[in-house]
Image: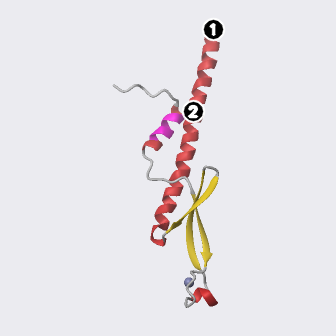
Amino acid sequence: MPRPLITNKQGKQALERIRKIKPFVQASLNITKKRCGNPGCRCAQEGPLHEVALLTWKQENRTRTLYVPIELRQEVERWVKEGKLLKRLVAEVSQAQREFLTSKKKSRKSKRG
Ligand SMILES: [Zn+2]
């Protein structure tokens, strides 16, 4: 038998959602415009410029970027969204565990009178 989860209702709900987490990335997706460098391309003269998607994140205090191919842009957007959700859920479970400890302290005190 697995041990019962020691948490409160909020913590249980957040853990339940973490269990269903899909692939994620903790980064942001930025769309920027640039020239492709081909002198024969429309962007070299009048435009419009090409849209480029870049994944940006911090690693060891440095900002890192990675080019995202257009066909993966929507997929990567989902990863970023999921990454934000996971971050929020991690904070919710931490909060729930702290509240659990606080409630224990209170009930022990009240029992003692
Ligand atoms: Zn171009």
**Camera-nearest residue between 92 and 40:** 40
Task: Name the image quarter holding the N terminus.
Answer: top left
Check disc 1: other Cα within 10 Å, few if <14, some if 14-19, many if 20+.
few
Check disc 2: other Cα within 10 Å, few if <14, some if 14-19, many if 20+.
some
Please provide percent x and percent y for residue 105: 62, 19
Q: Is mark 1 within 8 Å of ligand 1?
A: no
Please provide percent x and percent y for residue 92: 57, 39
Assign a secondary structure to mark 1: helix
Q: Which residue corresponds to mark 2? A: 96
Assign a secondary structure to mark 2: helix
Lower position in the chain sequence, tag 1 or tag 2:
2
The three-letter code of the residue at mark 1 reads: Arg
Q: Which mark is residue 112?
A: 1
Report which quarter residue 36 is drawn in: bottom right
Q: Residue at x 59, y 69 (%)?
A: 31
* Mark nearer the viewer, 1 or 2: 2
Q: Which mark is residue 38?
A: none
Please provide percent x and percent y for residue 34: 61, 77
CA gap, disc 1 and disc 2: 24 Å
**Camera-nearest residue between 105 and 39:** 39
> Principal SS element in the magenta part?
helix
The three-letter code of the residue at mark 2 reads: Ala
